[in-house]
Image (tube, rainbow, N blue to C red):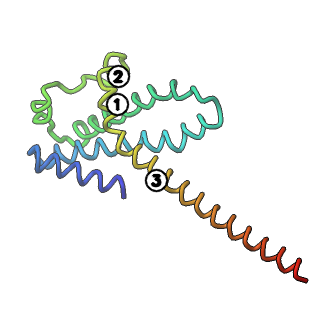
């Protein structure tokens, strides 16, 4: 649901606000959603459990890998759109003021990674924020339930002691 609503919001922003065509708006929205979803699930369900079980400093190794993964998936989406679906994205390049990547090799270059790190972080931050807030809420609700159960057991224990002393 999160990904669908994000894609719809991004599509609306690109088509209504910026004025991109249907295909370009869909391309940008889907590309951003797919790339973000891949990195999101890869991080929270594969990497984070590994980091929590092993050494804490492993995030320093995995962070650049996540950025490269996001850039790689983004370029794969671009290649599928232009080569397999044959959708013309030349208007997008005119608007952005840069040419498309000539090859996937450039995605793995240090310069390209450094130039796009900020964009990747900005693209992923809403999803990471929502996930962290949901988990914090879940932990808070669980702790409240545990506290209630603890107080209920204490009251029950006191009632049992009271009945024992009265008998």
The percent coordinates of residue 68 (x first, y second) are 40, 28
Q: Is residue 132 left or right of residue 112?
A: right
Q: SS of the residue at dot 1?
A: helix
The percent coordinates of residue 2 (x first, y second) are 36, 54
Q: Residues within 10 Å of mark 2 (few under 14, many from 20)?
A: some
Give the CA separation, mark 1 to mark 2: 8 Å
Give the CA separation, mark 3 to mark 1: 27 Å
The residue tagged 1 is 71
The percent coordinates of residue 65 (x first, y second) are 46, 27
Give the CA separation, mark 3 to mark 2: 30 Å
Q: SS of the residue at dot 2?
A: helix
Name above or below for residue 13 compared with residue 101.
below
Residue under the point 63% across and 29% down: 55
Which residue of the protein is positioned furthest toward the right in this rendering? 167
The residue tagged 2 is 113
The residue tagged 3 is 134
Q: Residues within 10 Å of mark 3 (few under 14, many from 20)?
A: few
Name above or below for residue 109 compared with residue 100.
above
């Amino acid at each position: 649901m999160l990904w669908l609503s994000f894609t719809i919001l991004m599509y609306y922003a690109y088509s209504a606000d910026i004025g991109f065509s249907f295909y370009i708006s869909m391309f940008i929205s889907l590309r951003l959603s797919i790339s973000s979803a891949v990195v999101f699930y890869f991080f929270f369900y594969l990497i984070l459990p590994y980091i929590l079980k092993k050494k804490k400093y492993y995030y320093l190794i995995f962070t650049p890998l996540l950025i490269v993964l996001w850039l790689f998936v983004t370029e794969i989406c671009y290649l599928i759109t232009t080569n397999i679906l044959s959708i013309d994205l030349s208007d997008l390049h005119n608007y952005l003021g840069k040419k498309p990547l000539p090859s996937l090799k450039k995605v793995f270059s240090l310069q390209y990674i450094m130039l796009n790190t900020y964009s990747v972080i900005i693209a992923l931050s809403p999803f990471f924020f929502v996930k962290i807030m949901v988990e914090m809420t879940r932990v808070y609700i669980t702790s409240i339930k545990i506290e209630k159960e603890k107080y209920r057991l204490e009251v029950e224990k006191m009632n049992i002691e009271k009945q024992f002393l009265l008998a």
